[in-house]
Amino acid sequence: MKRIIGKNLIISLSILFITIAIAVIISVTLIHSKTLNNSLTKKNIKNSDKLILGFSQIGSESSWRTRNTQSIFEAAADNDIQILFDDAQQKQENQLKAIRSFIVYQVDVIAFVPIVEDGWDNVLQEAKDAGIPVILVDRQINADPSLYAGFLGENGVEEGRRAARYLVNKCKNRSGDINIFEISGTENSSIVEDRARGFREIISTNSKFKIIHSENGDFLRSRGKEIGDILLASNVLENGNTTNTIYYNKQKIDVIFSHNDSMTLGFLDSMEAHKINPKGKGTIIISIDGEQECIDAMIAGKINCVVECNPNHGQMLMALVKQIARGEPIPRITYNYETVFTEDDNFSKYDPRGY
Ligand code: GYE
């Protein structure tokens, strides 16, 4: 009898030990999980007394975006800030879910790149009610300004103006109409509206500049190539040769204005696939971002101007996060440093772009 009781006791103790071991393993794993895990329901993610930043990124649609994300992670590590990161895969609904998860986790600060301008009021009100400050990164929103602490990113309107100022100067001695084909980015995003507005503000000073069409390329290289393929299909002559002149609805295109380098590179891919020598092209190509591959294409004579959009927001964001966590107000708008690269530059002065 004694032996049976002893045996049962050993079995019970073994089961108890295994259960405790499994519970410890699960909790250690969860605490170190960097990405969101919906099974967590409270602030048991605290890793010592580090600040916790919840960051919702829109995706990885371009090399620019990839560098943007890298800069956030690098700076969080440099500043000993714990980051909860979510990649929304280009869907606003995923960003809304992620922000609500950050609220449940009771992070110290929320930062996010709003993929589009509208639809944020409710979730930002929930963050405000939970006492969690929010910082907008890279793109802006249409919402009650009291719902977020401030914006960090680029001046999209000025980027559009810079692209147009380059074009006006390039064409200052040209008479006749200058027909522009615009390849824009993600619809209803603040950055597209800002760049378009700044570009139009400057070219409207001279009636010879005419935007004959604008096509949405969603900031994707694949879409830039698709747009090129459709446009350039008519460039193949009956004898199979191609002309370097690009047409849209039988109108000669003098300028391609592309809202980001990925779409520009996709368009170049199409030009090369259609045996249009980008070097010998009569078409002026202007792009925005400053990716290394686009700078290299400009140095090779395929592109005329690249307006910089600086993706390195990380260090500036972490400084704002620490400031806000100390209860100090942050500037409503913080712009990153940006410049313009053109075919007339001394390229030897260029530093590697890092993206
Ligand atoms: O130009 C593009 C990215 O929001 C400024 O988004 C950013 C833009 C950038 O996909 O490459």
Image (cartoon, helix red, strand yellow):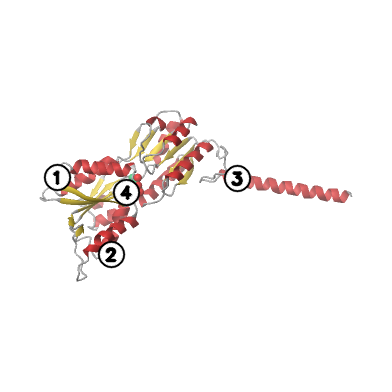
Label 1 lies in ligand 1 vicinity (Cβ under 8 Å) = no
| Residue type indicated by callout 2 | Ala
The residue sitting at 23% across, 57% down in the picture is 302
Q: Position of residue 253 (x, y in %)?
A: 19, 55
The residue sitting at 38% across, 31% down in the picture is 144
Residue assigned mark 4:
185
Give the label, 1 or 3, closer to the camera. 1
Distance from the alpha carbon under mark 4 to that under mark 2: 23 Å
Label 4 lies in ligand 1 vicinity (Cβ under 8 Å) = yes
| Residue type indicated by callout 4 | Gly
Distance from the alpha carbon under mark 4 to that under mark 3: 42 Å
Distance from the alpha carbon under mark 1 to that under mark 4: 25 Å
Distance from the alpha carbon under mark 2 to that under mark 1: 34 Å
Q: Position of residue 140 (x, y in %)?
A: 35, 38
Residue assigned mark 1:
207
Within-10-Å neighbours for mark 4: few <14, some 14–19, many 20+: many
Residue assigned mark 2:
273
